[in-house]
């Protein structure tokens, strides 16, 4: 009888401890997934911005070089697609972390500023070859 009285509370306390350990493990796993998801979203946003800046640069480079309309239209289509890709992360950051909104807007505006890039003037040294 004494063994039963000791065994029952021991089994119950063991179940409680096991439940607490499982709860803690589940919570740690959820937190790790949340951090990883947040990091992945940030990486996607940065990648989208870099892709958009590259597309903007390529289009302006083609425009300044006097490329034909077909190449300009293709570059413009890619530019529109990449611009759409940066808008969702941009709005998400502005809504979720308003303090970062000016930084995100400045990064986007920096890529838009490429459109107003002046036409390069030839350098006096551009026709020379290195020795």
Image: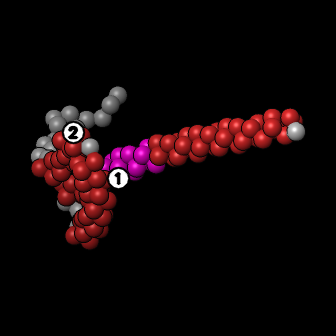
Circle 1 sits on which residue?
A: 48
What is the total number of numbered labels drawn onto the structure image?
2
Residue closer to the observer: 74 or 119: 74
Q: Work out which quarter of the rendered image holds the C terminus and state it.
A: top left
Circle 2 sits on which residue?
A: 99
- In this orientation, does residue 51 appear? no
Spot occupied by residue 22 in the image (x, y as percentages of width and height): 64, 43
Question: Which one is earlier in the sequence, the residue at label 1 or at label 2?
Answer: 1
Which quadrant of the view contains residue 19? Answer: top right
Spot occupied by residue 116 in the image (x, y as percentages of width and height): 12, 50
- Lateral position of residue 90 relative to residue 24, left or right: left
Residue at image position (21%, 54%) is 60
Over which residues does the magenta segment extend?
Answer: 36-51
- In this orientation, does residue 49 appear? yes
> Is residue 42 found inside the magenta-colored segment of the image?
yes
Q: With respect to residue 8, does 71 lie above or below?
A: below
Q: Secondary structure at mark 2?
A: helix
- Lateral position of residue 105 relative to residue 27, left or right: left
Q: Secondary structure at mark 1?
A: helix
């Amino acid at each position: 009888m004494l063994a039963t009285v000791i065994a029952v509370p021991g089994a119950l306390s063991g179940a409680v401890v096991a439940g607490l350990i499982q709860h803690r493990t589940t919570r740690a796993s959820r937190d790790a997934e949340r951090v990883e998801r947040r990091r992945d979203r940030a990486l996607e946003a940065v990648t989208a911005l870099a892709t958009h800046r590259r597309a903007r640069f390529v289009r302006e480079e083609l425009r300044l070089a006097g490329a034909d309309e077909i190449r300009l239209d293709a570059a413009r289509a890619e530019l529109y697609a990449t611009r759409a890709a940066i808008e969702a992360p941009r709005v998400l950051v502005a809504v979720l972390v308003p303090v970062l909104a000016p930084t995100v807007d400045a990064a986007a505006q920096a890529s838009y500023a490429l459109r107003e890039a002046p036409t390069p003037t030839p350098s006096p040294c551009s026709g020379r070859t290195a020795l």
